[in-house]
Amino acid sequence: MVNFRKRSILLFIHLLFLLIGQCFAQYIPDRDLKELFRDVQLQKVFADSKTFADSSPINSSDSILKAYRVAKQQPGFDLKLFVEKCFTLPPNKTDFQTKSSFPPIDDHLQELWKVLERHQSSSIGTLIGLPKPYIVPGGRFNEIYYWDSYFTMLGLRASGRVDLIENMVDNFAFLIDQYGHIPNGNRTYYLSRSQQPYFSLMVELLAEMKGASIYEKYLPQLLAEYTFWMKGSEQSKTINRVVKLPDGNTLNRYWDEVATPRAESYREDVELAKESKKPEVLYRNIRAACESGWDFSSRWFKDGISLGSIHTTEIVPVDLNCLLVQLETTISKAYQQKGETTKASLFTQKAEKRRKAILKYCWSEKLGFFMDYDFIEQRPTSTFTLAGLFPLFFKIANPQQATQVANKVKRYFLLHGGLVTTVTLSSQQWDAPNGWAPLQWIGYKGLKNYDQNALADSIKVRWIRTVERQYYQSGKLLEKYNVLYPEIPGGGGEYPTQDGFGWTNGVYLQMKKE
């Protein structure tokens, strides 16, 4: 018995050191390469900051850093040549079409699933290996992204690819098991934040195809994700992603565990922070906006205009809290499926409490629309955005509110090419004149939920026409579209418009089946 105990303790210690070793072995470029990373980014060795963040060191980061400190003292030192010698650069973007005429769009989309599918089970550089195949968005985005993937799955369902949907859900469950949450994407530099929590919707989608037992299967991961978002909720103050409101209600915000420049946009963040009196606050707010997926939008700007005024962490986002109602409801459903009715009832109560808080804090009677809530100013923000349609998508709004929202959509958001993201014309990609596939879907389904069928169908027709117009002009399925002038591509933001593109493909295919 003693020997058995000793062996058990030794085995436990061995496993613990293995785990610690894996954590420390994880390559995070801005942390591990120190001044080499900073110099490469600030000297613009690559046009896109993400290129170096995605490059894989050929030797250990310590040995490369030591070699750099010696080499840079030599006459004629060439930083780009040094990097090309010591790192494997990410593959070039795929040219999806090079012809002057293109096959039917539906045929091309089925081929695109093959182009965008990856199976990388081992970790390389910053890329975190996943056990099963998955779909990447395309273009510069050669890794899986959290909220993108739900909308991609809609198209996989329309294409009959239930197997790939289940593989992707399993991959996200794997990430939750490994890290306690689903990172923004499967890169080490994304580990400090998540994205809009769509895992419960993915589970629901899979359950519709494979039966209700799916809810119970993923219950541990649903609970772990909930724990991640509610970390610190037992305290009486606003902390992490949890916001404590004066009346005792708890809602949530976007956050990031780190307050440094983003590895994938290092140069852009450092340059922006030159004018900031509180660079760490700025960095965290930028990262929190990235957790929202809306990077960037006037939605997050205190002055409504400039990125330097970003204050994401002071905002209770209406979309995030609607998604957490869905998560709480899905956990309740999973417990019900398991026969644990007391726990099911507890999460039903949590969902109802959050629903009431959303209606209290995020509904503007004056504006007749759902808005984000600035909990520092203690009032709704003044920015009209399509996030205001999430309460319709999740059936949180009452019929009168839904009618008022529909009227605002018709008046302000419905343009020739589909729904515009905000009513603010800016250089940011999550503002006018751009429209994005996931928000077309949220708007379309949300309005359908309240029998606003003519408006919903108009969104569908205009969006499908916009996607097809660009495809037959260029052979590309784009990341975003200009819905004010659909004959030209979408633009704005930190990088050029990307083609591929996972969530556009998904929403287009599913909308055509509706």
Image: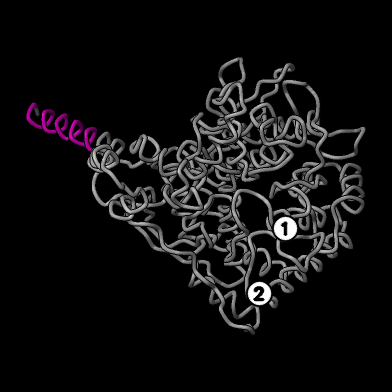
As helix, strand or loop, the secondary structure at mark 1 comes to helix
User: Height in image: 473 above or below 201?
Assistant: below
Q: Position of residue 370 (x, y in %)?
A: 81, 39
Mark 1 vs 2, N-terminal side? 1
The residue sitting at 92% across, 51% down in the picture is 411
Which of 160 and 338 lies nearest the eye of the viewer?
160
Locate the N terminus by quadrant: top left
- Residue 20 located within the stretch drawn in magenta: no
Where residue 375 sits, quadrant-wise, is top right
Magenta segment? 2-18
Mark 2, Cα crowd under 10 Å, few <14 / some 14-19 / many 20+, is some
Q: Residue 480 in the image: x percent, y percent?
A: 68, 59
CA separation in Å, label 1 and label 2? 24 Å
> In the image, is 175 to the left or to the right of 307?
left
The residue closer to the viewer here, 438 or 170, is 438
Q: Nearer the viewer, mark 1 or mark 2?
A: 2
Residue with the mark numbered 1: 441
Residue 98, label in figure: none
Tell me if 245 is positioned left or right of 23 in this view: right
